[in-house]
Image (cartoon, rainbow, N blue to C red):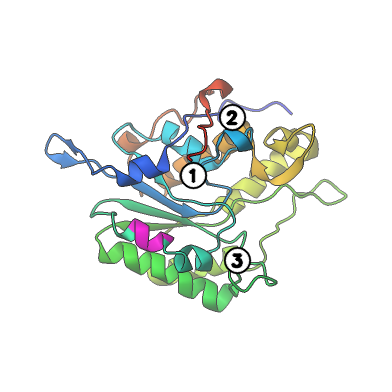
Amino acid sequence: MSLTRRQVTTAALAAAPLALAATPAAAAGSRRVRTVYIAGDSTAAQKYADAAPETGWGMALPFFLSRDLPVANHAVNGRSSKSFVDEGRLDAILGVIRPGDFLLIQFGHNDSKAEDPTRYTEPWTTYQDHLRLYVDGARARGARPVLATSVERRRFDAEGNAVPTHGDYPAAMRALAQEEGVALLDIQALSIALWQRLGVEETKKYFNWTATEQDNTHFNPPGAIAVARLVAGELLHRRVLTPRDVRRLDDEIPESWITWPEPSA
């Protein structure tokens, strides 16, 4: 399937989450540099050389944001809204986030794992309860929370229709966003529409399909950049960011721009 430049995606600049998170905010003239913090799961997380070509969309997001809007990517493989909190990872963000910063929150993939009590949340009760911890924590520190529904997996029915896989979690997040007056990036809806346009075969080029693995959840560089483009576009569309905060939304990006650092010792 041929795509427009907006739809054709490859790769982008990798973020160094811990370094960014630990670096004090610098001043740009009299205006303090704002930071976009990401709390999420493996679909957004930083990947390392031992996982390449798997790529989290958070690695690609910095390429679409202005240079004075850095990303601190705290997303971690396998985490749910509950386990991220229980492990102290939300507290780590809240310990450094500052007024004017943004907290981008994407959970749902692992919240549905009913067989694992350390991660499972129920969409309309405990899932929403945990999401409120992120929203309230950011607001209490003068930062702006932003909810993002989970990016869709690659799943098609026999007729070639892209199939939703996240149950009630996206709807529960949408309802919470409306109730709490929080900006919502509906990445689930946008991504499933993109997979539908691409179709069964073309979407394989966006997910982590290799000679030894057929992964329909995690992305390769083209897929990560496609989702990061959706995220950046929605941040602009929902007026979380202004036009001066984003860049290159229509550009084709060389896949070679993605890098995977060596894992830390």
Q: Secondary structure at mark 2?
A: loop
User: In 3D space, how far apart are the residues under numbered discs 2 and 3 (Cα atoms)?
Assistant: 29 Å
Q: Is residue 32 left or right of residue 116?
A: left
Query: Along the line of sight, which residue is nearer the eye, 105 or 249?
Result: 105
Extreme-bottom residue of the structure: 125
Q: Which residue is mark 2?
A: 9
Which contiguous range is marked in magenta?
89-93
Q: Return the mark for residue 52.
A: none
Query: Along the line of sight, which residue is nearer the eye, 163 or 30?
Result: 30
Q: Return the mark for residue 111.
A: 3
Of pointers 1 and 3, the one earlier in the residue sequence: 3
**Which residue does the image show at 58% across and 23% down from the upper left?**
255
Q: Amino acid at mark 3?
A: Asp
Of pointers 2 and 3, the one earlier in the residue sequence: 2
Q: Is residue 141 magenta?
A: no
Query: Along the line of sight, which residue is nearer the eye, 20 or 181?
Result: 20
Q: Which residue is mark 1?
A: 231
